[in-house]
């Protein structure tokens, strides 16, 4: 049997720096721990002589017999424990953990109520003399476990939680999970509460520390954006709120509460911790619930009719309040062309027309897109005064967004309806153009008059013709020849002119209902070339928009400015004068040269 511990101090008065003495230390008590929890009591020795690895022995004095020591465990003797601790030491429920050669911890894995008492750490001497202290004591108090954690309020004393909720929620909806955490303790303790989600591993979402500070975990960015928060309705009820669920939020949600107490040394110790499963949450994606269709399947119309089609947006479950939609109608005129936007309405209600419906050539079409039923709703597209260019395959594209504070939108689904066909009986418009010179012979400095005769089989009142004149000049190299526009008369009858090759003026006007005249003033040789007119027939609809019904190019006519007779008579005169001038200069040069040569001979 081990020697009894020294309960008294052996005192030695020494001059500072002349001697050292053994000193054993344990933390200052008392410490409070919860029944069923673990406790670790450190003990270290200093100022000793002998080997660096010191032995330690632990004893306990129970409140019922404060003068009787009960041996617990020893680092030297495995059979040191009294019978009350022998089985627990053997099963490692109670053991000594060596931290270093002169430091150990007494560890009790699961405290019992009878473990309360005064614990003494004793070190057998290895010193030459008995100097200093050989033991130290700490009081351990075991308090009952009153911590309760559950998903909802439970009756007092009930420690088990009801079965977890099975929640099936739509993406974008709010998740509310309540956790009851309370402890009825006579000591001053604090609680910390954390919410976590389990998938492959349990991950913390949000925690309330023992000092009441909130600490974000897995979703710190979402917490900062106020998408995740924790609310405290009373002293014991904590609520986790995820404002807009995402598919990755699916999992098993837990609530973990811990009870903390402050030891005499000022450190906070977690004395117990419990968890409860709150709910098993599955998140249905918006994409899996969103349905998009269009009606009717086919439309047969005539030019000028109103076209009406509806895009039906529905969901298998009611949509969340933060879910919003943008809808756009697209048309494909043929298999090889890309889809073009007709009209769209954004998530914030702004309507936009496609570029081809607001161009300078066609004007602004009368097209409307409106929502005609509650969310998610139906969206009606109307095209007033349909044109032949409106035929094609139409489909509606719906994009679903979850809206966040600050106006941020996050796309969660995009679907397109089956296409519907819009068919129109084609308009038979035959358009012809014939170009001619008013005079077969054009001379330089004359005014050339070119006529463009237009014929069309449609009633004149329904068509507006736009006519332009083009030229391909003869003086340009054949591989570089290109047509350029000289003048035009718009569909509104406005004349737009420039200059021709010789930089002289020109004009264009409408002389008859089906005849357009181009006049080139003061034509010159550089105006020689091939001329033609181009005619475009436009139909104007009641909404002020225009449709290009037909276009045709006329035949080419050759313009060759002839030289006048007076200009031809000058040619012999000019040639004769030039020849005489050359002969005279030659004779004069020859005579001068011979005269100078003779003068040189005479001087010699």
Image (cartoon, rainbow, N blue to C red):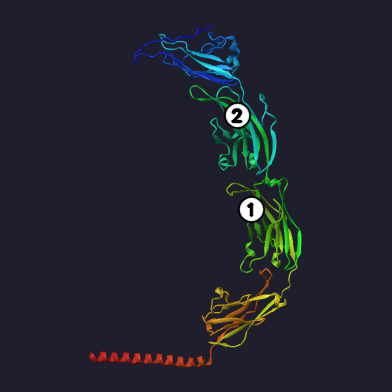
Gap between marks 1 and 2 measured at Cα: 43 Å
User: Which residue corresponds to mark 1?
Assistant: 347
User: What x and y, as percent, mark residue 82?
Assistant: 57, 9
Mark 2: secondary structure: strand
User: What x and y, as percent, mark residue 304?
Assistant: 72, 68
Instruction: Locate residue 217: give its quadrant.
Output: top right
* Mark 1 Cα shell of 10 Å, populated few (<14), some (14-19), many (≥20): some
Residue found at x 57% / y 18% = 142
Residue found at x 70% / y 59% = 381
N-terminal of the pair, mark 1 or mark 2, is: 2
Residue furthest left as drawn: 604
Instruction: Locate residue 245: give its quadrant.
Output: top right
Residue 391 horizontal side relative to residue 589, left or right = right
**Disc on res. 103:** none
Q: Where does the C terminus fall, quadrant-wise? A: bottom left
* Mark 2 Cα shell of 10 Å, populated few (<14), some (14-19), many (≥20): many
User: Which residue corresponds to mark 2?
Assistant: 257
User: What x and y, as percent, mark residue 458?
Assistant: 72, 76
**In front of the other: 67 or 105:** 67
User: What x and y, as percent, mark residue 146?
Assistant: 62, 23
Residue found at x 68% / y 44% = 285
Residue 457 horizontal side relative to residue 10, left or right = right
Instruction: Locate residue 143: give its quadrant.
Output: top right
Residue 201 visible: no
**In front of the other: 549 or 183:** 183
Mark 1: secondary structure: loop
In the image, residue 347 above or below residue 478: above
CB-based contact (under 8 Å), mark 1 and mark 2 = no
């Amino acid at each position: 049997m081990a020697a009894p511990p020294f309960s008294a101090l052996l005192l030695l008065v020494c001059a500072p720096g002349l001697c050292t003495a053994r000193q054993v230390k344990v933390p200052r008590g008392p410490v409070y721990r919860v029944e069923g929890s673990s406790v670790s009591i450190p003990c270290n020795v200093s100022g000793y002589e002998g080997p660096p690895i010191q032995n330690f022995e632990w004893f306990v004095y129970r409140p019922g017999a404060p003068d009787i020591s009960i041996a617990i465990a020893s680092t030297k003797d495995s059979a040191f424990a009294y019978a009350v601790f022998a089985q627990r030491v053997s099963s490692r429920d109670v053991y000594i953990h060596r931290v270093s050669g002169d430091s150990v911890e007494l560890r009790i894995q699961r405290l019992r109520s009878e473990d309360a008492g005064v614990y003494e750490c004793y070190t057998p001497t290895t010193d030459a003399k008995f100097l200093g202290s050989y033991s130290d004591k700490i009081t351990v108090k075991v308090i009952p476990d009153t911590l309760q954690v559950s998903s909802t309020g439970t009756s007092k004393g009930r420690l088990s939680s009801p079965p977890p909720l099975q929640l099936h929620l739509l993406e974008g909806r709010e998740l509310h999970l309540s956790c009851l955490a309370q402890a009825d303790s006579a000591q001053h303790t604090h609680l910390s509460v954390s919410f976590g989600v389990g998938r492959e591993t349990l991950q913390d979402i949000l925690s309330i520390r023992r000092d009441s500070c909130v600490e974000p975990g897995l979703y710190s960015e979402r917490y900062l954006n106020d998408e995740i928060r924790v609310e405290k309705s009373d002293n014991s009820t904590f609520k986790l709120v995820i404002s807009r669920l995402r598919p990755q939020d699916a999992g098993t949600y837990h609530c973990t509460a811990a009870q903390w107490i402050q030891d005499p040394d000022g450190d906070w110790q977690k004395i117990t911790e419990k968890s409860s499963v709150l709910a098993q949450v599955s998140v249905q994606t918006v994409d899996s619930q969103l349905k998009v269709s269009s009606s009717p399947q086919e439309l047969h119309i005539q030019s000028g009719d109103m076209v009406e089609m509806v895009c039906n947006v529905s969901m298998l479950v009611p949509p969340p309040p933060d879910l919003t939609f943008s809808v756009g109608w697209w048309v494909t005129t043929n298999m090889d062309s890309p889809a073009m936007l007709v009209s769209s309405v954004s998530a914030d209600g702004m309507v936009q027309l496609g570029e081809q419906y607001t161009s300078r050539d066609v004007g602004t079409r009368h097209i409307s897109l409106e929502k005609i039923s509650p969310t998610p709703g139906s969206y009606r597209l109307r095209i007033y005064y349909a044109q032949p260019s409106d035929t094609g395959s139409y489909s509606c594209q719906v994009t679903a967004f979850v809206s966040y504070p600050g106006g941020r939108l996050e796309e969660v689904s995009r679907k397109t309806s089956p296409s519907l066909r819009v068919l129109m009986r084609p308009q038979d418009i035959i358009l012809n153009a014939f170009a001619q010179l008013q005079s077969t012979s054009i001379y330089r400095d004359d005014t050339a008059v070119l006529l463009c005769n237009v014929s069309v089989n449609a009633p004149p009142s329904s068509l507006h013709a736009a006519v332009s004149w083009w030229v391909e000049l003869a003086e340009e190299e054949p591989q570089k020849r290109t047509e350029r526009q000289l003048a035009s008369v718009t569909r509104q009858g406005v004349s737009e002119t420039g200059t021709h090759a010789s930089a002289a003026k020109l004009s264009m006007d409408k002389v008859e209902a089906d005849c357009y005249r181009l006049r080139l003033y003061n034509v010159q040789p550089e105006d020689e070339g091939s001329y033609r007119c181009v005619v475009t027939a436009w139909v104007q609809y009641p909404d002020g928009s225009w449709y290009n019904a037909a276009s045709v190019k006329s035949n080419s006519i050759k313009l060759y400015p002839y030289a006048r007779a007076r200009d031809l008579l000058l040619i012999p005169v000019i040639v004769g004068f030039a020849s005489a001038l050359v002969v005279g200069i030659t004779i004069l040069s020859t005579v001068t040269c011979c005269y100078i040569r003779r003068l040189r001979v005479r001087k010699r």
